Amino acid sequence: MSTLSRRSFLRGAGGAALALPSFESLAALGAAASPAQRLAVFYVPIGVVRSGFFPGEADSATPAFSGDIKEHPPVREMPPGFHPIEFTPTLAPLERMKQKLTLVTGLDRTFQNGTDVHAQCASCFLSSAAPYSIKSSAWPLDRSLDHIVADEIGGTTPFRTLEFSCNSHKDNLESIYFDNISWYGTGHVAPSIRDPRKAYQRLFGTQEIQTYRNITDLVLEDARSMKRHLGYADRQKFGEYFDSVRTIEEQMDKLERMKGELADVSIEEPPEAHLPRGEYIRLMGDLMVVALQTGLTRVTTFMVGPERWNTPFMFEGLFDQPRSHHQMSHNQKKFTEDLLQVDRFHVEQFAHLAEKMDGITEADGTSLLDNTLFTYGSGLGDGATHQYNDLPVVVAGSGGGKFTTGQHLSCADATPLANLWLTQARAMGLDLDRFADSTGPISPLLA
């Protein structure tokens, strides 16, 4: 029994495999070390409506659309330093988690002229290379933060990194730069998993799962032998974990049936446009959380949707028909209320995942969220003006006690976004003096 660890795999008939969460009972036998640190990024496209997201801007005028990024200077509504978090209408879904959040405002990026605003804001979000520093590309795109961190902490996990995307559409009218945030290096994309079934099989299957038998059926018999050695609390955790995996399977089946039915109906949009957006995002998010929980990976990226694509999505509970986020952003004055609902909808999905992570107890009694830096962010400060200033950023979790939480940090003028990435890399244990166009770590964030 002492040879089992949190990365043990239970193997059943048919070649299926299932990773396990950490258990206190195994830790007591010396089988589990301190909880691992994790890094996760939740990327939202098209920016936000500033008046709904940023504290102090509720009465700001609604901007008209402009494609000229240079027209828009930084917006500074608060002096530098820490402030209490004001939960604006867009941020309100996060209020229950306020002690485990850090709102970071005032972070800027520099735009490299000559390439598209949307493509550059997405593809370069996690690399933040200095403009014109990459000679082999029109994009200021270098190895992204997730892979640099994984070089240090991902070597012992089955997957060094995992990339998830919630873009179910196949009608690709844009290049890969509009639809990816994770890069091995300049020109070398780390392709995202977009299909929940494929993600499930990649995480849990060593070969195709036998027809008529799902993965939990295959491993339960083997699992029972280990379950007898667990204490009461761990048995409860064990049951909750298998229930969550079963729920994921059922939700996948539901969405696949719905997609099949929609394919037989004559509709203008592709069937993917009518899939319930929140259900799809939460399903992919639950798969991401399970991967972090079980130690399959310690580094993930999660892209909610593509930049600039005009293909519509069904934001269930908001609108009766699928809507294009990007098209609405080009007329923010007309669609302000609709866009505010979409922004809040995205924050609700982030809050759901953060709360789910906080409800997962690690072997030492802390939560999965406590040991993760889980960052919400977008590459545009405002979707209508295309500004690269004052980006919307929220960090949930403390990375194992390394980050300050429960406050709003307003950064000084001209603070590069790369300063946050450098700070997170250091919190993950990397000895870096600089990352991309950073000017130094954001020291107040480090606990």
Image (tube, rainbow, N blue to C red):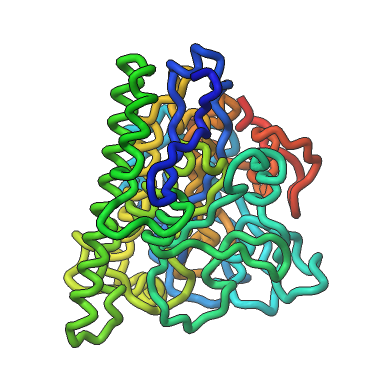
Q: Nearer the viewer, residue 23 or 390?
A: 23
| Percent of width and height locating residue 411 | 61, 42
| Picture layout, residue 440 above or below residue 277 | above
| Percent of width and height locating residue 206 | 48, 52
Q: Kindly identify the residue that appears in the image at 56 percent across and 65 percent down.
A: 191
Residue at the extreme top of the image, as rendered: 28
- Viewer can see residue 218: yes
Labels in figure, total:
0
In this picture, residue 147 sits left or right of residue 325: right
| Percent of width and height locating residue 352 | 33, 43
- Viewer can see residue 103: no
Q: Kindly identify the residue that appears in the image at 25 percent across and 59 percent down.
A: 253
In this picture, residue 234 sits left or right of residue 396: left
| Picture layout, residue 15 above or below residue 237 | below
Q: Quadrant of the C terminus?
A: top right
| Percent of width and height locating residue 294 | 47, 37
Q: Kindly identify the residue that appears in the image at 61 percent across and 32 percent down.
A: 445
Q: Which quarter of the figure has residue 75?
A: bottom right
Q: Nearer the viewer, residue 428 or 344?
A: 428
Q: Nearer the viewer, residue 16 or 373?
A: 16
| Picture layout, residue 352 above or below residue 332 | above
Q: Kindly identify the residue that appears in the image at 35 percent across and 14 percent down.
A: 231
